[in-house]
Image (cartoon, rainbow, N blue to C red):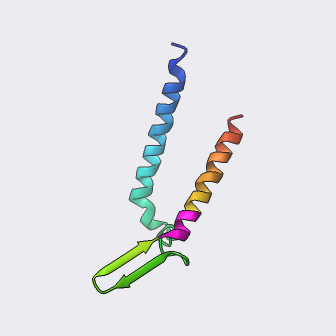
Amino acid sequence: MQNSFPIGKTLILAGILLVLGGMFVLYGKYIPWINKLGKLPGDIQIQKEGFSFYFPLTTCILISAAMTLLSLMIRWLSK
């Protein structure tokens, strides 16, 4: 039973992340700075007749940097 501990810990962490993600989806519209994501300067938006293209470049870079910092902090704290 010694080997089942990492699996249990992983499942608990995944459950917590799912709950937090669900709360973010439900209540994210009430947080003012969340509404600005996807509408930042640098996000590419092209609209023509019968054609629309949108790529949130700046938002992707910002989220990537935040996720990288979060993963580095988690790795640093787990040492």
From this view, report whether residue 45 is shown above or below residue 23. below
Residue 76 figure quarter? top right
- Examine the residues drawn in magenta and state their main secondary structure: helix
The residue drawn where x is 40% and y is 51% is 22
Q: Is residue 57 magenta?
A: yes
Q: Is residue 30 above or below residue 26?
A: below
Of residues 75 and 43, the one nearer the viewer is 43
Question: How many marks do you count on the picture?
Answer: 0
Where in the figure is residue 63, as x and y percent of width and height?
Answer: 55, 60
Q: Position of residue 12 (x, y in %)?
A: 48, 33
User: Which of the two residues, 56 or 13, is positioned nearer the viewer here?
Assistant: 56
Rendered residue at 55%/14% (across/down)? 2
Snapshot quadrant of residue 50: bottom left
| The stretch drawn in magenta includes residue 9 | no
Segment tinted magenta in the rendering: 56-61
Q: Is residue 75 left or right of residue 28?
A: right
Name the residue furthest bottom: 49
Q: From the viewer's side, name the closer residue of 75 and 28.
A: 75
Which image quarter is the C terminus in? top right
At 37% from the left and 83% from the top, the residue drawn is 47
Query: Residue 67, relative to residue 50: is it above or below?
Result: above
Q: What is the residue that sits farthest to the left in this orientation?
A: 50
Residue 37: give x, y in percent of width and height: 50, 69
Residue 73 percent across, percent down from the top left: 68, 46
